[in-house]
Image (cartoon, rainbow, N blue to C red):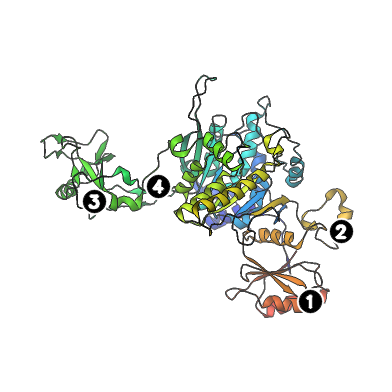
Amino acid sequence: MEKLDGKSMDLVKTNIEALKQLFPEVVTEGKIDFEKLKLVLGEEIEKRNERYEFTWHGKTQAMKLAQTPSTGTLRPDKESSKNWDTTENLYIEGDNLEVLKLLQKSYFGKIKMIYIDPPYNTGKDFVYKDDFRDNIKNYKEMTEQTTRANTETNGRFHTDWLNMMYPRLKLAKNLLSDDGVIFISIDDNEESNLSKICDEIFGEDNLVAKIPWQARQSVQNDTDISINHEYILVYAKKRRKEHRRLKESNYQVWHSIKEFACYPLPLDKSKFSNPDNDPRGLWKADPFDAPNIRPNLTYEITNPNTGEKFLPPRGRCWRTDEKTYQKLLEDNRIIFGKNGESRPQLKVFYEEKKEFGSVESTWFDGEKCGTATHGTKELQQLFEGIAFFDTPKPIKLIKKLLQLSTRKGSNEYIMDFFSGSATTAHAVMQLNAEDGGNRKFIMVQFPELTDEKSEAYKAGYKNICEIGKERIRRAGEKIVQETGKTDLDIGFKVFKLDSSNVKTWDPDFENLEQTLFDLQDNIKEDRTKEDLLFEILLKIGLPLTTPIEEIDYNGKTIYNVGFGSVLLCLEDEIDLNIVNEMMKHQSEHMPPKVIFKETGFINDSVKTNAIQTLKKNGITDVRSV
C-alpha cells in the first residue's frame, strides 16, 4: 500500500519532467545534461558575462521559495461559510504564498483570470516576511502581527517588496490556464519593478497592456502634479499568435486578426446608423487604409463624385487589392466621407460585425470603470455608511476585467490572492447575475488584524478576512434581492491555512523522541476526519469543491468523492466488511483511488487481505495516510 506524500506539488520535479518531454536527447541517466541542452538551444544561449538582467539581493532565495513544497494544509471552516453543501466558491484565510503552493496540484492550469491588488509599497503597507525554512511556523507568528510596515527608511525598501512579490507571481503563473490572463493593480512606486519581474516570469511577449486607470477624478492640490491614475498590468499565460481571416459578405476585406487572451467586448450598437437607408441595415464608416506597405495594395483611387485622386497615406496601403475594391464600390460598400468629397472609407455593417465585437482601449477612465471613490461608496452602502478600507477598487473596474478575460455566461475559475475588501468576489457574482454565467471565485487573504482604534474593530471585525466574508454575504443577498435570481451561487466555502493534520508530515525536529512516540497514531489529536479529508484532496490534486458524499456504514463514515473516483475511510477498526461496502460505490467509468488511515485497520492481516480483495476487483491504486 503506497503512502501519500504530505508535500504540495514538487515544481522542480515538474519542470525537469517538462524538459525531458521537450528534449529527451538531453537526458543522461535520468538527469539533465546542460551541455547537451546548450547544443539543442543553439544560438538562443546567452554566453556573455555582461548582459541585460534585473536582479536584487535575495532574488535567488525568492526563486527557491517558489519551488519549495509546502507541508501545510487548508482546514475547512463550515461555521463561517455560506451554502457549504452547494457552493463552488472558495474563501481561504492564510499566507497567500503557502496557499498558492497548496493549490498547485488541484488547480494547476485551471484558473482563467487572476486579479490582484497587492501592497503598493508606499511605506505604510503590511508586507509579508517569508521564512525559507518553515513558512507555516512563520505564518503562525505573522498572524500575531509580529511583522511591521515596510517603511521607506528601510535600507531594503524595494528589495523586500520584490522578494515578497516574485515567488507569489511565479506560483500564480502555474495556476493560469493556457488562455488565462493576470491583471495586477499598481501605482508609480513599484510599477517599473513589477513590470520587470512580470517580463521575466510571464515573458515579455506575453505583455498584453499596461492600462492607466483613472483612480480619482478630483485634482490633488498638495503635490507638484496631481496624480490621478494608477496602472493595471496585463499579462497572458500564452498570448496566442494564430490568425484568422474575417469575411464581410463575399469579400475578404479585413486584414488578419490576432487572437489574443483578452476577448473583444460587445459591439456598441449606438455607433452605427443608416443615413442612406441601406437595406443591409445599420453601418459605420471605417478607414479603407491599413498599416503596411504592399505594392499590390498600393494603387490610385478616384473619387467618383469629385474626380479627386487618392493614394494611401504615407507608410500605409489600401485594405484590399484593386479588383476587390471595384467589387466593393459596385456593392455600395465604399463611401467618400459624409458629403462624398473626401478619401474612400469602408461601410461596416453591424449585423456582419457584431459577432466579433470591438477591442477595448487602454485608457480606463473613471466614468467607464469607476474610481476609488465609487469603490468606497459601494462598501458604505453595504456597511451602514462605513467603508473600512481607504481605496477599495470599484465593482465596475473588476467587471470590465472579467468581461475582457472570460466569455459571456462562462463557468471559469477567477482568483484573487490579495482579496482585501473582496471586490473581486462581488464583481463575479454581479456579472454572473447579468449574463447568466457561473464563474467561480477563489479569494485568498491574510487575516491581518484590524487596528483597535479603527471603525472596523469597533464594528466587531477583528481582522480583514471577517470584513471580506461579510461583504460577500451582504453583496450576494443584495444581488439576489435586486435581480430576483435565486439560482445564483452566492455562497463560499471557507478554509484556513494550518500545519498538516498528519504528524509524520509535520515533525517536531526539536523534540524528535516525543514525535516518534506519538506516531503510534499519526493523526493530530485536535484534528477531525474532515480536516484530514480535505488535506488528502489537496495532496492528490482534487479541487476543494469536488462533490463529497458521506456514507454511514455501521457507525463508520466512508467518503465517496467525485462520484466514486476516490473512496476514503479514515476510521479506526477497519475490517473487510467496510472494504466490501466501499467497492459498491466505485465509479462505473474508471477504477477509483482508495485511501485508508495507515493505523486504521484492526490488524495487519486484515490490512493485507483488504489490499488483495481490492486488487482482485481491479482496484490497484490503494494508499494510506
Q: Nearer the viewer, mark 3 or mark 1?
A: 3
For badge 4, the amino acid type reads Leu
Could you tell me how far apart the alpha carbons at marks 2 and 4 are, in whole angstroms? Answer: 59 Å
Asked whether disc 4 touches disc 3, contact meaning CB atoms under 8 Å apart, the reply is no
Could you tell me how far apart the alpha carbons at marks 1 and 4 are, in whole angstroms? Answer: 59 Å
Residue 518 numbered tag: 2
The residue carrying mark 4 is 265
Could you tell me how far apart the alpha carbons at marks 3 and 2 are, in whole angstroms? Answer: 79 Å
Could you tell me how far apart the alpha carbons at marks 1 and 2 are, in whole angstroms? Answer: 24 Å
Q: Residues within 10 Å of mark 4 (few under 14, many from 20)?
A: some
For badge 3, the amino acid type reads Gly
Is any atom of residue 107 visible in this view? yes
Q: Tell me the SS state at disc 2.
A: helix
Q: Residues within 10 Å of mark 1 (few under 14, many from 20)?
A: some
Q: Nearer the viewer, mark 3 or mark 2?
A: 3
Relative image position of residue 556 (x, y in whole percent): 76, 72
Q: Tell me the SS state at disc 1.
A: loop
Q: Nearer the viewer, residue 473 or 517?
A: 473
For badge 2, the amino acid type reads Asp
Q: Nearer the viewer, mark 1 or mark 4?
A: 4
* Image quadrant assignment for residue 578: bottom right
The residue carrying mark 1 is 575
For badge 1, the amino acid type reads Asp
Relative image position of residue 321 (x, y in whole percent): 20, 46
